[in-house]
Image (cartoon, rainbow, N blue to C red):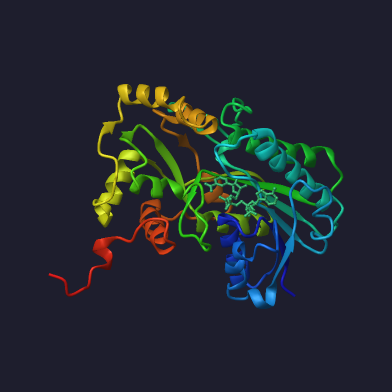
Amino acid sequence: MSELFVVTGASGFIASHVVAQLLAAGHRVRGTVRSLAREETYAHLRALPGAAERLELVEAELLEPSAFDELVRGARYVLHTASPYALDASDPQKDLVDPARRGTENVLEACAKAPSVSRIVVTSSMAAITDEPESDRVLSEADWNEKSSLTRNPYYYSKTVAERAAWDFVETSARSFDLVTINPFMVIGPSLSPALNTSNQLFADLLGGAYPGIMRFTWGFVDVRDVARAHLLAATTPEASGRYLCAADTIAMRDVVELLREAGYGDRALPKLGMDCAVGDYVVKLSSYFQPRGVGSYLRTHVGRVPRYDNTKIQRELDLAFRDVRETIVETVKDLERWGHVKPNAEAIAPASAG
Ligand code: NAP
């Protein structure tokens, strides 16, 4: 019989791809969603090939103690992806940190009572590795974010305390499972649902004129399908262990803008003004104080920095080959058009006979 996987936060951007890949591989999936009443948030999962036969959806709220006790029973693998993902929150403790940490502890406590569970994969983040990437240092799985707090990059803080809680739990508790974490950088790519993910939002913002100029930002990107595959491999590779930094290439904002221009989006409100210099950094830092607090601290801690990291462990131990994220960027933008998050490309929809 096929294996049973539990996927928390199944309707999310990354988890939807995880569920799709698990079903495609013939597995049974029990996915958790926050509310079964909000059918529009998970209708896309029901439509996946294999879903009618092998997908079960159940309700679970991260903050509810014992919410996961029943639903992990009988599962061999638990993939815990659910966690609030937003740079800003009006009450960072309540909105970000509590659900991230308590949710992780609730899932692990439930698994400790379920002898069937042999491995848990927690979706952590690059945010648990660094708060502000230092351009002269190569980051690896050995690094921990030591700087974030409730007032400085609170989302980063929530991911760090949640992952630390997970490792503390496995060190101190009796259990039948082991733990692996996936630590992705900025996850982009086509979405299986109409929702606009926080990371894909970057491209909607770039095309929509939200950036006054080209700033000195450099992002580490990874395709959502690779992140989903990393989760499957982390669960089913017996030797997998520890943390896995999951990021393909870094690309500077100037190159992303150029890429979008070359892909036919030059008619959009792409930034033109060159602010990728010391004066530009200063202007970004100054203006960051007029942004919501979480966004402001992100801008101040990331402008002018070029993240460098060693992504060889995941490629070597999980045999994961990364897609070319330049192609993913173009696919993402086409997908944003498909879902109506950016207006369709006039060139792309012009009749073939035109001219
Ligand atoms: P997403 O689409 O917003 O998915 C987050 C999921 O968590 C949603 O299904 C959401 O349910 C669920 N969730 C949030 N709060 C919850 C609560 N209190 N109770 C139950 N469920 C709750 O974001 P994503 O990008 O796929 O993120 C998935 C995971 O990857 C997160 O742990 C995130 O931190 C991590 N990650 C993401 C990125 C990225 O660039 N996207 C990078 C690194 C790590 P609702 O739909 O009901 O809100």
Looking at the image, which residue sits at the far left? 355
Say if residue 78 shows up in the picture. yes
Question: What residue sits 59% from the left and 71% below the top?
Answer: 24
Q: Is residue 338 left or right of residue 242?
A: left
Q: Is residue 176 visible?
A: no
Q: Residue at x 74, y 48 (%)?
A: 62
In the displayed structure, 350 sits above or below 255; it is below
Residue found at x 75% / y 56%: 60
Q: Quadrant of residue 94?
A: top right
Q: Position of residue 65 (x, y in %)?
A: 83, 47
Identify the image quadrant of the N terminus: bottom right
Q: Quadrant of residue 38?
A: bottom right
Q: Quadrant of the C terminus?
A: bottom left
Q: Quadrant of residue 151?
A: top right
Give how far across and how far down residue 31 sits, in percent. Answer: 69, 62
The residue at the point 46 percent across, 60 percent down is: 190
Q: Is residue 245 above or below residue 157?
A: below
Q: Residue 279 at what x, y percent from top left? A: 31, 22
Residue 111: image x %, image y %?
81, 52
